[in-house]
Amino acid sequence: MIRITRAVAIGGRAIVESFVRSSGPGGQNVNKVATAMQLRFDPTSPGYHRSRLVALARRRVTQRGEILITAQRFRTQERDRPAALDTLIRLVERATEPPLPRIAIRLAAASKRRRLEAKAHRPRVKEDRRARGEE
């Protein structure tokens, strides 16, 4: 059991660890020993804020809905395992934090006018370039 916050903890059954061959430095060792850690996390249990977790994980989410984290920064399993767990913990911590509320602001009239003038000016510059090129 990995405690994230007082209310959120990751159970042992939600995580599946496996080791695969790693890319990168290591010489012949990289072709023989499975040192990279692959961690699969199933966020279907309540309390993980699944929608935010999946949105934060983006490309790490598999078709089955699991979050796949690969750690291969180090050359040993002993160092890659905590790195993968740390990545998962930080991801779940970020998902449990409530998002900052958006505050509606009102733009000043002058800044709105400057923005619209800049938008109108750009096509004129391009039109001038086209006209010079045809001459």
Image (cartoon, rainbow, N blue to C red):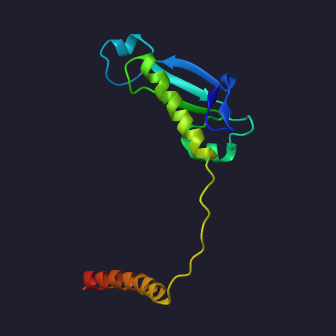
List x then y, in percent, for residue 110. 45, 89
Res. 57 image quadrant = top right
| Number of numbered callouts drawn | 0
- Determine whether, in the image, residue 48 is placed left or right of residue 32: right
- At a point 59% along the width and 70% down the height, the residue shown is 103
- At a point 34% along the width and 80% down the height, the residue shown is 126
List x then y, in percent, for residue 6. 66, 38
- Determine whether, in the image, residue 132 is placed left or right of residue 87: left
List x then y, in percent, for residue 106. 56, 81
- At a point 26% along the width and 80% down the height, the residue shown is 133
In the rendered image, the quadrant that contains the N terminus is: top right
Which residue of the protein is positioned furthest toward the front in this rendering? Answer: 6
Work out whether residue 80 can be spotted: yes
Res. 93 image quadrant = top right
The one of 62 and 93 positioned closer to us in this rendering: 93
In the rendered image, the quadrant that contains the C terminus is: bottom left
The one of 38 and 122 positioned closer to us in this rendering: 38
- Determine whether, in the image, residue 127 is placed left or right of residue 49: left
The one of 100 and 109 positioned closer to us in this rendering: 100
Res. 59 image quadrant = top right
Position above or below: 96 against 117: above
Position above or below: 92 against 28: below
Which residue of the protein is positioned furthest toward the right in this rendering? Answer: 46
Work out whether residue 35 can be spotted: no
Position above or below: 95 against 120: above
